[in-house]
Amino acid sequence: MSSSFTLPLRPTVEKGAREDALPIRIAQINAQRGSFRNVTEESLKAEIEAQKNGVERKEDDSKESDVDATERIDLLYKRRADITQFALQAHMESMFALDFISLLLSKHTPRQAELSMSPHLKQVAPTGSLSTDIITSPEKSESAKRDRKAVSRGWKLESFNAAANKLLKSATRLEEEVAAETKYWGEVLTIKDKGWKVCRLPRERQALGVQYGFLEATPTFRDRGLASLRRAENGSLILDKGLVPSKARAVRVQIKRDGRTTGCSKMPTGPSNGECSIEDRILQARDTLFEEELFHELSREARIMASQGVMTGQNLIQFQASEGQDVILELVDINETWDDRPSEGHVPEDDTLSDGIAHSIRILLSYAHRQNLRRRRQIPPPLTPKKRSTPEYQLLRPIAGYLQHSSHVRSLGAFLKDVYRVLQSAGVDCSYTATPFSSVNLSRDSGSSHTVERITKEFLSPFESSFSGTLATPASSFNIKVRTHMAPPSLGTDYEISINLPSVPDIQPPARLGLKDEVEALITHLITLDLVNVIPSLSPRSKPSSAEHISSDNAKDVKHCLLGSPHSHTTENYVLFTQPQVEARSWLLSFLQKN
């Protein structure tokens, strides 16, 4: 037959409908070729050419180095020696056992035993030298048996009595322990029912503790706010306060005027000399820790306010509220008597002020804790290698700003009251309006349901008060805004003044003034200019040219004109005024001249 029949010897490989995925292909290549690092384009081309020429590619086996071969031979010999030693030891122990049994049997069957005995044993020990025998103990008499039973019964009775005594003692101790544990856990449950957090101690998991501190405080005081609840012998609860001092302490606020104490805040009542409950001790520890944290934060803030006249000492902070009035904050023990205020220098207003300051700093610290809690609930900022510094709480700055703003507002209000009283006594139709703390708006909706938080936010913002009034001329007016900032860059109190003088339109006050004397001098100057322009219009013989001439003079010439200088007006301009009006105007002019 011309056509040949071929039969394949290898099984046919059918390709699937789906191609292999890339991870499967990579696994196949790694299994066939190893790493991709060993596969190059030249090696693949050479392999293809070799397959075409019928030459199979053979991979050379990697040969180990001489050092590796030497180590393997040494290891092999060592393992072989160990196996041989173990086999010899097992053979020796089995031969010893065989010699012992053979020597024991040589007493009864010597010929059979000699066949299994070693030559060394035959030389050392004669045949039949080792034997066994059964010994029966002699029977005891009846009296000995009775004595033995009596002794046994006595030991049993004594053991039973000892066990009974131990059980009774254990029962008594267990009863006392149950009573003590019941009392202990009863007091623990009482503390928990009253709202205190009871938890395990971090470093002593088998002990319980009560969390009386504030979790939003600084780490130093937060870690000190956990006390262990120990059990006494009688089961009563012992509060181990750790680093909290045993004496109750609190921050006291004093007001001094000219070196004399005229006001003092009320101190909380300390615990009595008798035994107090566990809740009272927890409350005392919490209050003391809060007061120490309060004074610590006040001291931190006082150090950055040293440029504003705040002085610090050991457990003492002092700053000036107004002229001749100082505020002193101290950390004192509440059990001691602190009443160095003389009875003749007692001022109820200063007592009220000191109580207000004491309550304010505590509310501000609680507000700072709540702000820390809100920040802790938010998404934390990204991590940085630089440690973030803890900013100082705003405790002392709002108090000092409020007192400073109140002092400036009262001073300016008293000045305007005196000036307008003189002007109105002289018959001048003018008035002024004062709006202290116009920036405080308690009805503002800040999205918070807490009234205290809303008031605190208003208290932390810059304070602003406004004064507005009219002058002698109906169209003349002024507006003064007093602002107090306790944060840089605009630190302190400044005055923003705007005026409306149609008779002198070219005169404009400075944008801002920072001193109270400058503001009073400016108001005096404005009133003087307005009076210079309004007085000629009140006289029937006054001339417009004279009024225009006076309005263009400076402040010094204005005062000379009002005082009746011979170079300006004469006394004929005042003939229409009554005698009280003339006296009032003369007093006003002398008052303006002094300022």
Image: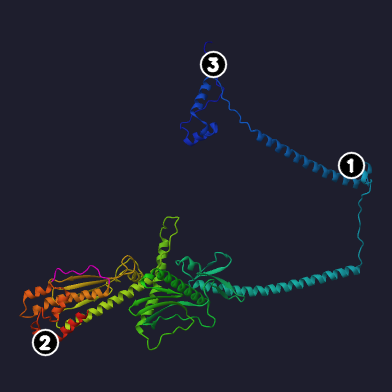
Look at the image and give the residue range highlighted in magenta.
504-514
Q: Residues within 10 Å of mark 3 (few under 14, many from 20)?
A: few
Amino acid marked by disc 3: Phe
Q: Counting residues from the N terminus, which is met first, the one under dot 3 or under dot 2? A: 3
Between 9 and 524, the one lying in front of the other is 524
**Foreground mark, 2 or 1?**
2
Residue positioned 41% across, 85% down in the render: 341
Q: Counting residues from the N terminus, which is met first, the one under dot 3 or under dot 1? A: 3
Q: Which residue is mark 1?
A: 118
Residue 247 left/right relative to 174: left
Q: Which residue is mark 2?
A: 578
The reply to whether residue 471 is visible in this rendering is no
Residue positioned 47% across, 84% down in the render: 337
The reply to whether residue 478 is visible in this rendering is yes
Q: Quadrant of residue 261?
A: bottom left
Report x, y in % for residue 252.
43, 78
Q: Spot the residue most to the top.
A: 1
Rounded to the nearest angstrom, the CA distance separating label 3 from label 1 is 79 Å
Residue 103 left/right relative to 387: right
Residue 23 against residue 367 in the figure, above or below: above
Q: Which residue is mark 3?
A: 5
Q: Counting residues from the N terminus, which is met first, the one under dot 2 or under dot 1? A: 1
